[in-house]
Amino acid sequence: MKNFIRKTFLKLKSAKRGVALLIVSVMISIILPLVTDMNYEARTEFELAMNYKRKAEAQVLAQSGVNFAVIIFDLQRQIEAVLKQFNMGQTIEIWDIVPFDTSLLRAFTMAGPFVDIEDITSQRESEQRGAITNEEEGDYTHTEVGDPIFQFPGDFRIEFETEDDKINLNQLAYGGRAAIIKMLEAIIEPDFYDFIFLENTSRKEYVSRIELIQNIIDWVTPGTEKFVDGEKYLVGGHKQRQYDDFQPRYRVKTAKFNTILELMMVYGVDDVIYRILEPHITIYSTGKINIMKAQPMMVEALIRAYAVDRSATIFYNEDSMRELLGKVLARRARDGFSKPDDFIKAVAEEGVQLEKEITRIIDVSSNVYRIRTTGVKEGIESWVEIVVDREGNMFYYREG
């Protein structure tokens, strides 16, 4: 009897252990995924919060870069004043010489022939702690100690790009129209663009070179009638007629461009034509093209637009044009152009005479710049892009 009771007790005890083990296993199988999921969500939310924090810090760094750009402009004015004192006509822009990237500048200022910034900082801090005291006269001198240069968490870099090496499309609406028309014609004149303007092209909005420029003029000029000038632009009519079949339908603006992307709304401007024009156009410049900064295609357009003899062989031979451009650009790199007449002379020495009227549209300095500052904090970037002139007037602001 005792053995039976003992065996029964052991069986019950074993059964209870089995049930307990089963319950524990079930609980673990339920709780483990929940805990893992909660842990994953917590880590994800933490990383998102940290990235948001880094993004905010990067944005502040980018905005600090804008303030630093103001200092750079002031320094540039001082350099130009010194150059003017010594009758050095050629403009030197410091952002073409020094890369304004704090990660590079930090390494540069703390290496080579420069004194270690940390040594200077330590010396100033000891002066502050000891505070120079003259016991005899009872004088106390306090020394302010700021942060060492570029010694801050994160980095920013600043990029300067002049807007004055491009054509200002908004000037089609007023006085500078004739010069802008000539430049637009010159940009799309080369033979290798012929395939775009062939009548049998598959382009949905077919236009000739003349019609394209006429449509751009019509977009920015007031009134309902198409632009005509009695020479090339002879076909008039109502501006809106070409746009009536568009879905969704929209009207011709008859006012200045607000953005360059707005050019895509002009009848006849597709992706191909936009990509051809976009590097050479702006809506912010002073209206004069800085020949010291102009891209090779813009230099070629200037030569094509203002050549005295447009029938010269060079304008129908791409190899000859490339050779001419190479020589003019080499002259610019070697000697620079201190005044517009230097450019005219350089081109004349290569056999092409330019109209004196070109001096109305070219210059050797810039006044309007597009500045992009990028803040970087632990791999997260943020940027600010502005368009300003040297007097500090802002025409455009965007951040991201």
Image: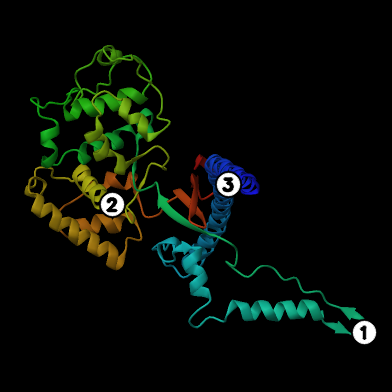
Report crowding for label 3: few under 14, some 14 to 19, many 20 or more residues within 10 A (C-alpha): few
Q: Which of the labelled discs sits on residue 311, or is there none?
A: none
Above/below status of 124 relative to 94: below
**Residue type, mark 3 in image:** Ser
**Residue type, mark 2 in image:** Gln
Say left or right for 240 vs 154: left
* Residue holding disc 1: 137
**Residue type, mark 1 in image:** Glu
Ranked by sequence position, the earlier of labels 1 and 2 is 1
- Looking at the rendered structure, the secondary structure element under dot 1 is loop
* Residue holding disc 3: 14
Above/below status of 384 relative to 157: above
Say left or right for 3 vs 229: right
Query: Marks 2 and 3, how far apart in space?
Result: 89 Å
Coordinates of residue 268 in the picture (x, y in percent): 23, 25
Is 7 in front, or is 2?
2
Query: Marks 1 and 3, how far apart in space?
Result: 94 Å
Q: Which of the labelled discs sits on residue 295, or is there none?
A: 2
Display coloring:
rainbow
